[in-house]
Amino acid sequence: MSVGGAQLPRDSEDPVLRMRLSGGKTRECQPEELFSELTEIECSVGIMAYNEEANIAHSIESVLRQKLTVKRIAEIIVVASGCNDRTPSIVAEIASREPRVRLIEQSRREGKASAINLFISMARSPVLAMVGADVFVGDGAFDALLGHFADPAVGMTGGHPIPVNSDTTFLGHAVHLQWRLHDRIARETPKLGEIVAFRNLIPSIPLDTAVDEISIQGLITQLGYRLVYEPRAIVYNRGPATVPDFLRQRRRIHSGHLRVREQQAYSASTMSAWRVGRAMLESESFATPRAALWNIGTMGLEGAARALGRYDVIRRCHSPFIWKTCDTTKKHIAEAVNAQCQHNVAVFHIINFHHLELEIGLHAGRQLSRRIADHIKQVLGSSATVSIQKAGTFVVLLPGDRDEVERAACVLIRHFDATPVPLNGCGTTTHVALACGIVAFSQTGPPLSRSIPISRLEPDPAPSTVR
């Protein structure tokens, strides 16, 4: 295959001592020279996409907004392989206003490895990075990954994937358990995936691999370089939400690991049942009966997926490099990331509560506080934690987008402004005016605080009436 005059694959007699220069040329260099140049030269980012219209824009934007202190993202190369949706047009629109973004289209789907080889052949930087088209890169991830390349012994780094699935369901629990174990194992023996960076030293990866990051790991370690897992480099992904999708994904990954072990004599650290078992015991995953039951179910699914993956390798009955996508992993991820990353503290206060309590009495004031707290919980939903403080104040902890929380707070304020609150079963009611302030805490930035405007600041002259 050739694109823009570049041939695939690229040959190299001694890839350790070859550096790619701007314009695609290479020259011989010593490791010390490579170290000095890497403190100044940029990084090329590759995104391989197949029908990713739901998330491709968010994935690219999450890379573009990265702030780097040492290096610079010189280019983002998106390889769209046989897409029949809006993915190419979305990328082209971004490229029209952002010169660092380049779109390369493959007329037909040839597998992710083929797209990666195309990216490697076109990239111009001495450090390459790859992220999925359906993930969202957390702020500071690239700075954390690329900083390790100041050490000339480091050849590849990888980040910390965090799923956005809700862990209140069985499959959500299974996905979170999977990535928690991945994190624990990778901290001891690096296993890199979802977001990786590596020196531009390998000409290509095997075309029949289904686990490209592991294939790259094997090649980099064979060149004598060290792997580094960087837990601060966070990337958000979405795991399967149905049993068939979970089995399909885990089956493909295990069969891919087996093929890499067979072809490259390299095994991922998560292939060790001993490591997985020890990580599970250390993670305190059996703290509750439900968690223990769901863990057993997860292990059963994983065992079935691994058995199917081994069957595929033995029988050679599935294409290892072109696979059916899992639809439930392709849903919009940006909104889920925002909801997971941001936590809000909303403080509601009954205006002139002391005066109101004198009018209706101490006992009625306590009843009023409980009724207001119940209504706040009802409006904001089960994810809200509401606590009643003294003097008519309520503290609400609520995850999610700050704008949505603010809109819900405005609804509450208008409701109490317009609707009298019953005090007892005898028809006694009172009007309540609420003030509210919200502090939004984000994992990726400073907290934001703001008060909610209210229509009036004084309660009715007659605080209570009898109907």
Image (tube, rainbow, N blue to C red):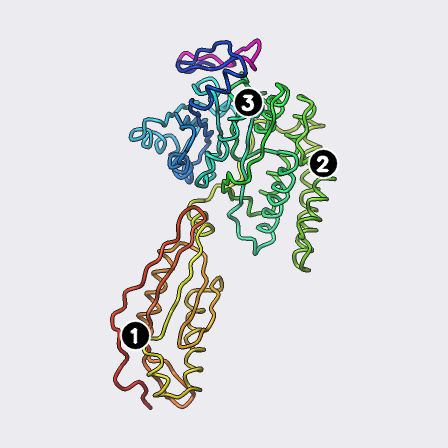
Q: Position of residue 81 (x, y in %)?
A: 45, 26
Find disc 1 in the rendering and name its residue: 417
Label 1 to label 3: alpha-carbon separation: 65 Å
Q: Position of residue 140 (x, y in %)?
A: 45, 39
Mark 3: few, some, or many residues within 10 Å (few <14, many ≥20)? some
State the mark number for residue 272.
2
**In terms of secondary structure, what is the magenta stretch mainly?**
loop
Residue occupying the point 60% across, 51% down:
173
From which residue to which does the magenta span run?
5-17
Q: Nearer the viewer, residue 266 or 315?
A: 266
Marks 1, 3: nearer the viewer: 3
Helix, strand or loop at mark 3? loop
In the rendered structure, which disc, 3 or 2, sits on the residue that comes first in sequence? 3
The image quarter containing residue 95 is: top left
> Does 67 lie within the magenta span?
no
Q: Are marks 1 and 3 in contact (CB under 8 Å)?
A: no
Q: On the picture, is 372 further left or further right than 327?
A: left
